[in-house]
Amino acid sequence: MTTKRATNFHNVFTIPHQINTLARLNKKVIYDILFRSVSETLLEFGENELGGKIGFIAILHTWDQKLAEHIHLHCIVSAGALSADKKRWISSPHPDFLFSVKALSRVFRGKFLDYLKKTNTKGELIFAGKSLEFKTKYGFKALIDSLYKEEWIVYSKKPFAGPKKVLDYLGRYTFRTAISNDRIKDVKEANVTFTYRDRRDSNRKKEATLCADEFIRRFLLHVLPGSFTRIRHFGFVSNRNRKVNISCLKRLLGVSGDTGEKLEQSLEELMLKLTGKDISKCPHCRIGTMTVCYLIPRLSVGMVRNSCEPELIDTS
């Protein structure tokens, strides 16, 4: 019996919870540092260990099953690399993993903390509330020193065996918010009850109840900065050279360049195909069809807030 070879690997990069208080007031800065340090780490490992350029998609998640802060990137990484001269496809020598997670975690930690220190030196970090303890030179140094002493978590999940599995995962996972409607089981007497998976208890499904204020507070922790891109492409699938690289890879791997006629699909059709959910149907009765009555225009930042200093809010 032959095992189907992986086409993509799945790595998860997590930052320690000590950074959470700082991230609440510096979401864009911290999330950008996370994307940059992870992408540079993976690309360097691809060059050094495979001898070419890998391709991967990185997806930002900031929550755990109970809506608490858990900032991490899911990375769908190619099971090989494109050589610099674009004449060879270099397959991963390992069937079950791409790179050592221990080595990845240490390089990732070094890059992230280096960028964090440089950002602080430039005065680009905001401190308020609980994060004020890091504002002084010695307080920030103590934070950095404690983070260097920790082993950062990079988790290697089960690899994807075939493009269909990758597309299925992306369809289900990339458009998630912190919690879906079907997980909310009850709302009464100013309390919200919802289901969650307990990772520490064999992934059992359980229920948790929070007061409405705490539920809303936790949910709002995961609202992204305006126009922030939470799904990004790197390596040979980066936006700049993706078309040329994909054509080259099809030729090298003997895949037909003819993908058939491209059909224009609406958002509703695309979601139905990727997730199996018909978003045009009423979420309650599943019979009535929802129609667009009015489009609310997007407000620019200048229309929402004037040029004064932004209000500092610490949700801790």
Image (cartoon, rainbow, N blue to C red):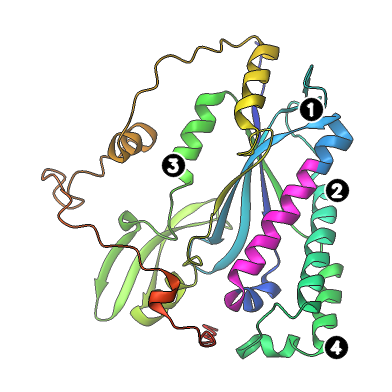
Q: Earlier in the sequence, mark 4 or mark 3?
A: 4
Q: In the rendered image, which quarter contains the N terminus?
A: top right
Q: CA distance from mark 2 to mark 4?
A: 29 Å
Residue designated by label 3: 172
- In this rendering, is residue 26 above or below 271? below
The residue lying toward the viewer, choosing from 66 and 290, is 290
Identified by mark 4, the residue type is Tyr
Residue designated by label 2: 103
Residue designated by label 1: 94
Are there few (<14), some (14-19), or many (20+) residues within 10 Å of tag 1? few
Assign a secondary structure to mark 1.
Answer: loop
Magenta span of residues = 24-43
Q: Earlier in the sequence, mark 1 or mark 3?
A: 1
Q: Residue at x 31, y 77 (%)?
A: 191
Residue designated by label 4: 138
| Residue 63 relative to residue 91: left or right | left
Q: Residue at x 45, y 60 (%)?
A: 178
List the single residue furthest toward the right.
48
Q: Earlier in the sequence, mark 4 or mark 1?
A: 1
- In this rendering, is residue 146 above or below 133? above
Are there few (<14), some (14-19), or many (20+) residues within 10 Å of tag 4? few
The residue lying toward the viewer, choosing from 51 and 211, is 51
Identified by mark 3, the residue type is Arg
- Circles 2 and 4, Cβ within 8 Å, touching? The answer is no
Tag nearer the camera, 2 or 4: 4
- In this rendering, is residue 196 above or below 102? below
Assign a secondary structure to mark 4.
Answer: helix
Q: Residue at x 85, y 88 (%)?
A: 138
Q: Position of residue 279 (x, y in %)?
A: 26, 44
Residue 221 counted in the magenta span: no
Assign a secondary structure to mark 2.
Answer: helix
Q: CA distance from mark 2 to mark 3?
A: 30 Å
